[in-house]
Image (cartoon, rainbow, N blue to C red):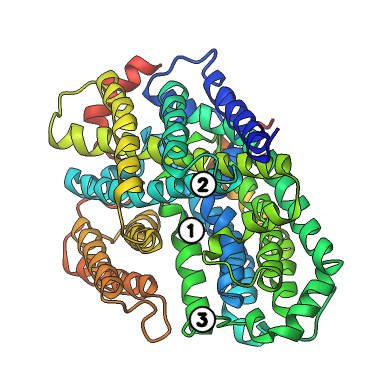
């Protein structure tokens, strides 16, 4: 199997760095943002930012994918 | 009408509607094995989304997310992080699995191992791990279903009859419509769940505190330690968080039912796009947390934290609304249970029974056996749920720890040519032994780290070492692989 490109792997590792490995940095109540404790605010923000990162990865991966070149998948 | 009757009427209406849609989905489709298990590989973006979302929102999310927020506090955040990080991993592995699936006409996870490693016993072992791990998961859905119906009917229907009726319906529509029925029943369930989560998650904090912000302010004042890790627990700290989030997000798609759902897609592109947008669907998850956290101050003395959502709804809203939430909750148990039944039954018939006991079976006979197995598995899980005394959570965690051990075999199998059958076998066995040992001896978390994660690390190490010491028989998917051809060629002829 063809490995994914370095760029998309880097983009995919951003959400992991932000929402998983760095837990000690953001797991606290203050400062509260938009009425949410900081840790809740942080993870909800990354819920919205993860699709942004993965959309970037999609743009990088899609042209390289074998099924894109062979035939169009179609939408609905 | 009494509150019980009102709630029951609302709940039955919803369950009936969901099941009806499930039955009707078979129209215009001839249900051979390929249609029944992977819907002829014809699903587009919307149906793949519905199927994947439908099976991911289980009773564990519905009751567990609010329940953990209530009883454990901060550690509940792992559910939020894990629920969108799984799609980052899905983005990289599911399109590859789909590609292999299309090329070799795979229908189950064990088929994947069969083709990649060319070893029937390894595939049968994987199928066995899958079926055995699915049973506690099914049982969890069932018990959740019973609980939901009991509470939502104000005790009018007790647990056992609720489980029998609910599971009878599930088994019936899986039997009739296969995976198509499940995807369509998901539509009803997801619309309801979305509505229920948004409404309840916003309304409950508003009624008792005047909003989500004031609710957190009150909680930060009264119980600040509840909002961060380890919350109300002693040993669920940051090391546990990182190891648990990693374990679940990496290995989530090793559940055979999620793995096989990727085969239903029409193209790899659909899976990639789905992985990009799926995290947005998880937006309702924090709302479940808000309900559980409100209950910390409003109903501080609940005996069972998993009931915090339903107890809050019952306290706050009229009976008919509780009925709607109960109906949504019941479907949330039924849809994932349906796909678990379908997957378990197919794995048993296709990858355990046929290769080991009766190699001469045709595809039609396998389909017939799988359908019979749906009924047997449903009955088995029902008996377990009614009579078993073992804690469900511990059974579920054991199941998950077993499933997670399939990850190195899949991911190394996809990307590396060097991994061998013996390596995959030894790694899996080592991982399962370590996980079962640590969990059964009460060592989870072990020194603050999730036991399943430790087992996964051992698994990777053993897979790597044994692979380097043994000879390669099947070097990746790029070679011409005749492995499945023996049983598949005659099937594909009859299918096309």
Q: Is residue A7 above or below residue A60?
A: below
Q: Where residue B396 sits: x, y (%)? A: 38, 58
With B395 as the anchor, is A76 left or right in this view? Answer: right
What is the total number of numbered labels drawn onto the structure image?
A: 3
Question: Residue at position x 17%, y 60% from top?
Answer: B471
List the residue tagged with mark 2: B95
**Mark toward the viewer: 3 or 1:** 3
Locate residue A8: give its quadrant.
bottom right
Q: Where residue B346 sits: x, y (%)? A: 33, 34
Placement of the C terminus of chain B among the 4 image quadrants = top left
**Mark toward the viewer: 2 or 1:** 2
List the residue tagged with mark 1: A3
How busy is the neighbourhood of tag 1: few (under 14 within 10 Å), some, or many (20 plus)?
few
Q: Is residue B347 above or below residue B460?
A: above
Mark 2 residue element: helix
> For this rendering, which residue is in front, A68 or B39?
B39
With B210 as the anchor, is B380 left or right in this view? Answer: left
- Spatial CA span between label 2 and label 1: 12 Å
> For this rendering, which residue is in front, A59 or B120?
B120
Question: Residue at position x 35%, y 52% from top?
Answer: B136
List the residue tagged with mark 3: B233
Placement of the N terminus of chain B among the 4 image quadrants = top right
């Amino acid at each position: 199997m063809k490995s994914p490109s370095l760029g998309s792997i880097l983009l995919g590792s951003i959400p992991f760095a932000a929402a998983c490995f760095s837990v000690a940095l953001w797991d606290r109540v203050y400062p509260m943002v938009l009425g949410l404790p900081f840790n809740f605010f942080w993870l909800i923000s990354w819920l919205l930012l993860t699709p942004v990162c993965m959309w970037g990865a999609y743009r990088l991966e899609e042209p390289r994918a074998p099924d894109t070149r062979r035939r169009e998948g179609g939408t609905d | 009408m009494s509150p019980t009757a009102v709630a029951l009427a609302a709940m039955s209406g919803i369950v009936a509607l969901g099941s009806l849609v499930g039955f009707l989905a078979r129209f215009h489709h001839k249900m051979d094995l390929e249609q029944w298990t992977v819907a002829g590989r014809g699903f587009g973006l919307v149906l793949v989304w519905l199927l994947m979302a439908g099976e991911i929102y289980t009773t564990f999310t519905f009751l567990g997310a609010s329940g953990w927020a209530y009883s454990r506090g901060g550690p509940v955040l792992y559910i939020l992080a894990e629920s969108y990080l799984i799609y980052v991993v899905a983005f990289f592995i599911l399109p590859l699995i789909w590609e292999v699936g299309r090329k070799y006409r795979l229908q189950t996870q064990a088929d994947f191992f069969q083709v990649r490693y060319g070893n029937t016993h390894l595939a049968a072992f994987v199928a066995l791990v899958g079926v055995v791990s699915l049973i506690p998961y099914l049982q969890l859905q069932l018990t959740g279903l019973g609980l939901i119906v009991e509470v939502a009917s104000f005790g009018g229907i007790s647990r056992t009859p609720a489980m029998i009726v609910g599971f009878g319906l599930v088994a019936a529509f899986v039997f009739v419509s296969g995976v198509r029925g499940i995807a369509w029943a998901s539509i009803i369930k997801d619309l309801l769940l979305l509505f229920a989560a948004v409404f309840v998650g916003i309304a409950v904090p508003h009624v008792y505190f005047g909003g989500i912000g004031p609710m957190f302010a009150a909680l930060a004042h009264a119980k600040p330690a509840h909002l961060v890790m380890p919350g109300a627990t002693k040993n669920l700290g940051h090391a546990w968080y990182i190891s648990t989030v990693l374990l679940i997000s990496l290995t989530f798609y090793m559940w055979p039912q999620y793995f096989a759902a990727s085969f239903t897609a029409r193209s790899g592109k659909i899976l990639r796009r789905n992985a990009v947008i799926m995290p947005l669907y998880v937006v309702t998850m924090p709302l479940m947390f808000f309900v559980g956290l409100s209950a910390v101050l409003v109903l501080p003395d609940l005996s069972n934290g998993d009931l915090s959502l339903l107890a809050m709804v019952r306290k706050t809203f009229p009976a008919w609304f509780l009925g709607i939430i109960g109906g949504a909750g019941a479907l949330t148990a039924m849809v994932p249970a349906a796909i678990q039944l379908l997957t378990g039954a197919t794995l048993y018939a296709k990858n355990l029974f046929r290769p080991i006991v009766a190699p001469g079976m045709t595809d039609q006979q396998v389909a017939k056996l799988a359908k019979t197995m749906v009924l047997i598995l449903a009955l088995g899980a029902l008996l377990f749920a009614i009579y078993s005394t073992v804690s469900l959570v511990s059974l579920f965690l054991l199941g998950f720890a077993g499933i997670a051990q399939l990850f190195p075999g899949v991911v190394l199998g996809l990307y590396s040519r060097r991994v061998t059958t013996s390596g995959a076998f030894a790694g899996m066995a080592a991982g399962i032994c370590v996980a079962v040992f640590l969990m059964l001896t009460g060592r989870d978390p072990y020194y603050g780290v999730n036991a399943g994660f430790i087992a996964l690390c051992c698994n990777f190490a053993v897979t790597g070492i044994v692979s380097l010491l043994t000879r390669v028989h099947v070097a990746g998917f790029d070679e011409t692989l005749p492995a499945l051809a023996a049983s598949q060629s005659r099937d594909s002829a009859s299918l096309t």
